[in-house]
Image (spheres, rainbow, N blue to C red):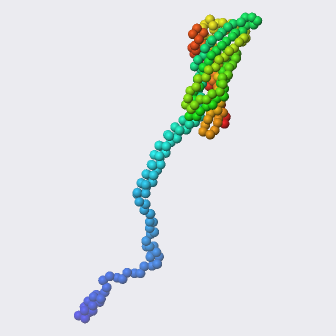
Amino acid sequence: MSYAKHSDASSFHQPLLSDPQPQSQSQHRHQDPPYVVVLTYQPPHTHRLLSKSCRRRLICLATVLPFLVAAAYLLWPSDPELSIVRLRLDRLHFHTLPKISIDITLDLTIKVQNRDFYSIDYDSLLVAIGYRGKRLGSAMSGAGHIKDRGTSYINATLVLDGVEILSDVILLLEDLAKGAIPFDTTSEISGKLKVFFFDISLKTNISCEVIVNTRNQTISRQSCYSEISEES
């Protein structure tokens, strides 16, 4: 009986749970929490503001750029346009003595069109005429003024007396029989282009191959090309 009671007492005082064993220092370090990376938060409206600003700049650039290109195109100096609008054969006379020669009187009207927004003051207009590569003579007109975006008609008269064409007399007779004479004309205008406060020296040449109808004294065909040289 005594043994049974002792056994019950020992079982009554026995702890139900065992005490946890102390952890070693290495295990404690191993179980430390990992590092945490904290990201900064940027509100979404900042991106919206940046995108709106970029869009505004692009829209402004796209709006202004065509105007700048158009202004540069309109204000950039260009060469005046020259063309022969009238060439009249007033006099044509042959001489056989003392040598074969001809007398020619030609009236020309040169159209000068200024396409710039700047005026032109020209000093002179020189007109030269030739036949089949041979220069027959030239004439010069006086000075003048062409306003901006304006057009001027300059008259010039070439009076050629006793011009020898011994080498081309047969060709000239053939052209007269056909009723069409080909002439080579060169017109040169020199002056100054007024660009704001600056004067730009200007010299423009135009060379034309002109076919003159001897029956009605008109130009039946002309082919021209121009050249320009500018010096500040």
Compared to residue 71, the image places residue 110 above or below, namely above
Residue 105 in percent (x, y) is at: 66, 13
- Horizontal relation, residue 104 to residue 45: left or right: right
- Residue 9, above or below 97: below
In percent of width and height, residue 25 lies at 46, 78
Q: Which residue is drawn at 65% across and 30% down?
A: 191
Q: In which quarter of the image is the C terminus?
A: top right
- Residue 156, percent across and down? 64, 20
Image-quadrant location for residue 92: top right
The N terminus appears in which quarter of the rendering? bottom left
Residue 64 visible in the picture: yes
Figure quadrant of residue 113: top right
The answer to whether residue 103 is above or below residue 43 is above
Q: Which residue is drawn at 71% across and 12% down?
A: 161
Q: Residue at x 31, y 86 (%)?
A: 14
Camera sees residue 190: no
Residue found 44% across the figure and 65% down from its top: 38
127 relative position to 69: left or right? right
Q: Which residue lies furthest to the bottom in this view?
A: 2
Residue extending farthest to the right is: 98
**Across the whole image, how many numbered discs are drawn on residues?**
0
Image coords of residue 202 (percent x, y): 65, 31
**Depth check, front residue: 127 or 222:** 127
